[in-house]
Amino acid sequence: MGTRDDMRISLAAAMTLGLEPGMFYRDARLGCINLLMTDPKGCVGRCAYCGLNNDRRGEYASKGFIRVKWPTLPFEALLDAMVARQDRFARICISMITRRGSGAQVVQVTRRIRERLDTPISGLLSPTVIDGEDMEAMRDAGMDMVGIAVDTATEELFDAMRGRGIRGPHRWGRYWASFEKAVEVFGEGMAGCHLIVGLGETEKQMAGAIQRVRDMGGRTHLFCFYPEPGSALQERPQPAVGQYRRIQVARWLIDSGLGRAERFAYDDGGRIGAFGLDAAALEAEVRKGTPFRTSGCPGKDGEVACNRPFANERPGEDLRNYPFALLPGDLERVLGELWT
């Protein structure tokens, strides 16, 4: 697990900083250096889908998560590499683990980065072990945006996969209260809520969760479930691609102020049948291709920096989140998938 002076870094970020060999499919470029706090005792969360779960089984117990390995390196070595290659990325994200003391660690790391770099810094926070004062300390140290990973669309799914249902420490109410506080501390539009499609929710429920985030003054960072080997959900399939495409469009319309979840049409199973826009207006939006690109924190230019290449799938044709602008062939593919 490393010591408290170590940090983990995503494989894509390590490649971007020249710390790991490799090439990106279709010459994708990572815009955000994703860092992860460590602790010798690991994360106390027991989330059923997560690769950081200490209950992870067998040969996968010490492996990475979000599909790829996350090397562990001394923080100073990572900071030196970021300073040396700061022209290669537009944002840095520090992700917490659920462990007492992680909030103070994040404040310290943020301050040390800010002393040497003016790159925007985000934090992916664990509400279970921090409060509003911790958020204010992070902001004062130089963090400008945060994310709260609610992940599930309903309280029942949250409890089953993150809370009492698996003897986990997380609570639905605390997460939403923390998100509300994050908007207050960092400002409207400066807090993102992570939501994962494919954990058992209906499309109507997910659209409702996205709308809740928007109405609270935040934005949604959308993920497609990917089964982590060794996790409790390792046998669960990814959601149908059409389901994910419809939620991508829903998120785009809601976050852009072009639609609302309650104006969408749903069938008896909660599947989206229409988005409340006339055909020409909907066609214009989806043909931009932007709804199908990765949603995440932006850089100074306003463009998404946290584009997480291939975190939801293996490189190839079946991309759920596009980390680059869609080519005409990509666009025709996703439009064909939208109503499947």
Image (cartoon, rainbow, N blue to C red):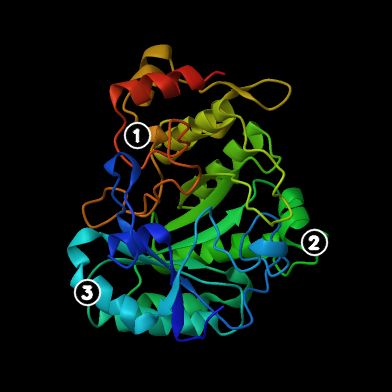
Q: Earlier in the sequence, mark 3 or mark 2?
A: 3
Q: Is residue 155 above or below residue 164?
A: above
Viewport quadrant of the N terminus: bottom right
Coordinates of residue 59 in the picture (x, y in percent) = 67, 63
Viewport quadrant of the C terminus: top right
Q: Image point 63% across, 58% down: which residue?
A: 50
| SS assignment at label 1 | helix
Q: Disc 2 residue type?
A: Ile
Viewer can see residue 209: yes
Q: Tell whether label 2 touches label 3 (CB within 8 Å).
A: no
Separation of marks 1 and 3 at Cα, in angstroms: 31 Å
Q: Disc 1 residue type?
A: Thr
Residues 180 and 313: in front is 313
Disc 2 packing (10 Å; few <14; some 14–19; many ≥20) = some
Query: Could you say which disc has been placed on residue 166 in the image?
Result: 2
Viewer can see residue 137: no
Q: Earlier in the sequence, mark 2 or mark 1?
A: 2
Label 1 sits on residue? 290
Question: On the rendered structure, is 47 left or right of 274?
Answer: right
Coordinates of residue 175 in the picture (x, y in percent) = 62, 62
**Which image quadrant is residue 31 in?**
bottom left
Label 3 sits on residue? 83
